[in-house]
Amino acid sequence: MITINLDKAKQIGHDKRRAARAEEFAPHDEVIMKQIPGADAEAAEAARAAIRTKYEQVQTAIDAATTPDEIKTALEAA
């Protein structure tokens, strides 16, 4: 029988969540970081705030998970 270490599974889930969040942030980070003329920094920051909110919910779901399947479900919702 295979035993899954839930704490380790949660850690892996959080790593995947961070990587996905960073990927979604990348285009908006460029606009903010480079202060590109003609690019709307306010819209980029609003998009970043929406991404933060989305991944806060995923983080909460991972922390509350009691099975590996719940962790997978939380990551798929992202």
Image (cartoon, helix red, strand yellow):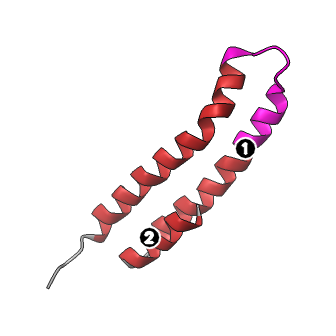
Dominant secondary structure, magenta: helix
Would residue 38 appear left or right of 68 to someone viewing this image? right
Q: Position of residue 12 (x, y in %)?
A: 35, 57
Identify the element where label 2 is drawn: helix
Amino acid residing under circle 2: Ile
- The residue wearing badge 2 is 71
- The residue wearing badge 1 is 49
Whether 47 is among the magenta residues is: yes
Would residue 20 appear left or right of 37 to someone viewing this image? left
N-term mark: 2 or 1: 1
Q: Could you tell me which residue is drawn at 59 percent across and 33 percent down?
A: 26
Q: Which mark is residue 68?
A: none
State whether residue 47 is above or below residue 28: below
Q: Residues within 10 Å of mark 1 (few under 14, many from 20)?
A: few
Residue 46 figure quarter: top right
- Of the 4 image quadrants, the one containing the C terminus is bottom right
State whether residue 38 is above or below residue 18: above
Nearest the viewer among 23 and 62 is 23
Q: CA distance from mark 2 to mark 1?
A: 23 Å
Residue 66 figure quarter: bottom left
Residue 42 figure quarter: top right
Q: Could you tell me which residue is drawn at 54 percent across and 41 percent down?
A: 23
Q: Position of residue 22 (x, y in %)?
A: 53, 40
Nearest the viewer among 49 and 31 is 31
Q: Could you tell me which residue is drawn at 28 percent across and 62 percent down?
A: 8
Amino acid residing under circle 1: Ala
Whether 50 is among the magenta residues is: no
State whether residue 35 is above or below residue 78: above
Identify the element where label 1 is drawn: helix
- Of the 4 image quadrants, the one containing the N terminus is bottom left
Residues drawn in magenta:
34-48
